[in-house]
Amino acid sequence: MVEAAVAMDHAGHAAPARGLTRWLTSTNHKDIGTLYLVFALVMFLVGGAMALLIRAELHAPGLQLVNPGFYNQILTVHALLMVFGAVMPATVGLANWMIPLQIGAADMALPRLNLFSFWLLFFASVLLTSTLFLPGGAPAAGWTLYPPLVLQSGSAFPVAIFSIHLMGASSIMGAINVIVTVLNMRTPGMTLLKMPLFCWAWLITAYLLIAVMPVFAGSVTMLLTDYFLATSFFNPAGGGDPVLYQHVFWFFGHPEVYIMILPAFGIVSEIIPTFARKPIFGYDSMVYAIASIAFLSFIVWAHHMFTVGMPVAGQLFFMMATMLIAVPTGVKVFNWTATLWRGSISFEPPMLFALAFLFLFTLGGLSGLMMAIAPVDLQYHDSYFIVAHFHYVLVPGAVFAIIAGVYYWLPKWTGHQYSVRLGQWHFWLTAISVNVMFFPQHFLGLAGMPRRIPDYATPFADWNAVSTIGSFVFGFAQLLFVWLVWRCARGGERATAQVWDGAHGLEWTVPSPPPYHTFATPPELR
Amino acid sequence: MSHAEPSPGSAYYFPHGSRLPFYGSASLFVLMAGAAATLNGAAAGGWILGLGGVLLAGLFFAWFGQVIRENQAGLYNDQVDRSFRMGMMWFIFSEVMFFAAFFGALFYTRQFAVPWLGGEGSKGLAGLLWPEFEAGWPTNGPAALGPRADGSFDVMKAFGLPAVNTMLLLSSGLTVTIAHHALKSGQRALLKLFLALTFLLGFSFLSIQVYEYGHAWHELGLQTGTGIYGSTFFLLTGFHGLHVLIGAIMLVVIWLRCLKGHFTPRQHFAFEAVAWYWHFVDVVWLGLFVFVYWL
Ligand code: HEM
Ligand SMILES: [Cu+2]
């Protein structure tokens, strides 16, 4: 089957187009996966540069680099770019590359739609970034875009809203593609419960995306009409309520955080068995855990709103529901740990990042549990504690898993083995600095430092300085990663088809790099 | 891959590369930039918006034209057909969730926000802002927002034109089903007739809605700016109307394809997709009729 695919390529059919045309017009899932991944990396660096600016401003009390208005703009754009431009597209890129290879499909089910999703995302990001340069500057209300503050934006306002509409459309199309591919394109014999966990995680992520992106589109549409058509959705004078926005936004927003973490769960569930050289512990329970997390994520949204004055019954409900999520999450952490138990573990870069994920994501989940307790969240809310929480789940959580995934599959994509030593250097610098950067933010938050401010009281100075130092080490350590990926794409020791001796699954049966077209005929499952 | 033999039932058809996705994204970019410029009052805004609209129309012609050609050439096997079906169902699900956001807003304001503003319950603190405000529905809020100087407005009555519109849309759901049965049993004349009836009913619905909007805007004092009632009324019915328009246009396209002899009793995914969409629009209307007009 592998030979067949290679032979066809030699026959010269549908070889990739040349030059730029290839990237503008290719509907090949591998090309589109590469586009998404490169795009995400660029956005990660752009968003990261903004973060360094933020941290530089916060290095010491007082205002030194930027004015407060611009600070708020850059904070807002940093978050939106990282969420919609870096983390989500990176996971979509991995899905594009790996899902067809893992389920033995020749391509994604709807290839033209696939390319459309990518380019729409690209143009939407151009729109979003352009808001920084428009009169009045970018929206400055934070990524949650709460009214009435966000309604004070200048002419960037409709541009930002429309960019969100386009990003939403792009995500929905991408998600439809993933669902249809997974449900309709599996090679015969691969039943749903034989599917790699990465595909399961993405299947459920795609379902979440289709369910909540339209709600986000609806919520920002209401902002738009409040601004331009005099509607009163969020205006009490006309019978509306700004809290309504928060409900609609978080109905999207909470599932959105799982949209970022579930693919990460999937990646880690692929890597840990490979490098522990044991099958995953409790495959079925892993699937049920992802499904329960997805279900629960729809009924916990108001844990972001404990301070807005909900009725007590509401507070209690959302508190209990939120704490319930710890159960399926705990199942996953337990299963990963049990997979490691008595495994013959080796510590190549993918495994190092996956292990760091296991510890540090769990730490972020635990601070989440603390904040889920409504009465104590009155203290934590809008402080640096929550900044620490979500950066722990997103950076050493989602981002580490993505990096682990890249280290895991990079030899497959490029056909070259990278320098494991360099990867280990990258890992240790990153893993140490991420803690130097974010751990002190727990202390700052508990001591009462509010989030989203460019200046602060002097007692917060020391830990802020530490955090800033960590952030710069972290930022520059990522250049090592960029260099490593670049080098690996250009050349290096040839990688075998299996790449890692403990790796199992269809993606490891095709050569590295895989021919442009794989699985023209559905492969046999062994 | 491009090697798919053009006989149905063989390999899954994968397109060669395509220029349309990039072109389409660029068109949407122009459209959205134009819309934003228009909203900001820029002089060229309308032109850019119009250009974006033309480009987008071109996209639809080119894209669906290509898909129809591939389909007529017999490139799509049953598995491709299944992909399209699933894709359409999930797309409709996403549309359901879009409307859910606005229905949610309606229920939340009616159930919570407005009573709280009226001083009800433990959250009634909000009522201190406007002690005189009596909660009720429909309302344009404590400040009685709206076009009339005295802050009054009239309600859109359910059992006038909206009831007629309900009848129109429900019958169009019936006619499209009859058309579908006709297609499956090979009665082409009946198919064309009932499909035409369906989109005619759709366009009649739209005409009545346009009339009703004019009436509301100019005579009832009911505008988007008429407090939360006007907001929910226009956004919910407006987005629904937009979907009826899209659905009706799709019905016309399908009808034209029927005239050209497309579709077989066994293979007619496009017809079914449009019929599903039309039923979805129908169901949303029922929700609107009950919760926006009637109760
Ligand atoms: C056990 C799991 C989790 C629990 C119990 C939890 C709980 C919470 C709570 C209660 C808040 C609100 C705090 C406040 O505003 O006062 C919060 C905020 C947040 N969480 Fe989590 N969380 C969990 C996992 C995650 C994961 C996996 C992610 C992302 C990958 C995430 C991302 C966020 C973000 C981004 C915010 C801040 C939103 C904002 O206000 O800007 N959380 N979390
Ligand atoms: Cu949450």
Image (cartoon, rainbow, N blue to C red):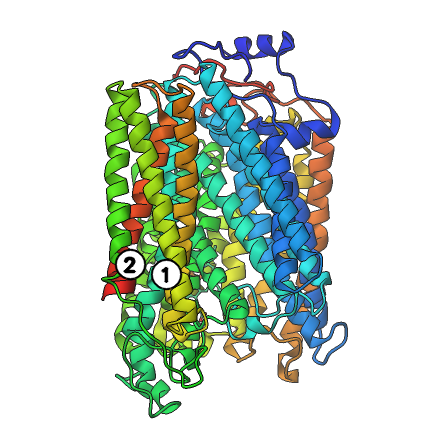
Mark 2 chain: B
Would you say B159 lies left or right of B2 here?
Answer: left
Residue A382 is situated, as x and y percent measured from the top left of the image, at 50, 74
Ligand 2 located in image quadrant: bottom left
Assess disc 1: are there few (<14), some (14-19) or many (≥20) residues with their C-alpha within 10 Å of its C-alpha: some
Residue type at mark 2 is Leu
Mark 1 chain: B
Camera-side residue of B50 and A494:
B50
Camera-side residue of B176 and A424:
B176
Residue A491 is situated, as x and y percent measured from the top left of the image, at 73, 26
Assess disc 2: are there few (<14), some (14-19) or many (≥20) residues with their C-alpha within 10 Å of its C-alpha: some
- How many discs mark residues in the rendered view? 2
Residue at 71 percent across and 38 percent down: it is A484
Q: Is mark 2 on a helix, strand or loop?
A: helix
Q: Are marks 1 and 2 on the same chain?
A: yes
- Cα distance, mark 1 to mark 2? 8 Å
Camera-side residue of A416 and A215:
A215
Q: Which residue carries the number 2 mark?
A: B161
Residue type at mark 1 is Glu
Among the 4 quarters of the image, the one containing residue B132: bottom left
The N terminus of chain B: image quadrant? top right
- Mark 2 near ligand 2 (CB under 8 Å)? no
Q: What element carries label 1?
A: helix
Whether residue A61 is visible here, answered yes or no, is yes
Residue A203 is situated, as x and y percent measured from the top left of the image, at 40, 38
> Is A204 placed above or below A278 here?
below
Whether residue A340 is visible here, answered yes or no, is no
Residue B28 disc label: none
**Is there a contact, CB below 8 Å, between mark 1 and mark 2?**
yes
Would you say A336 lies left or right of A68 here?
Answer: left
Q: Which residue carries the number 1 mark?
A: B212
Residue at 63 percent across and 51 percent down: it is B49
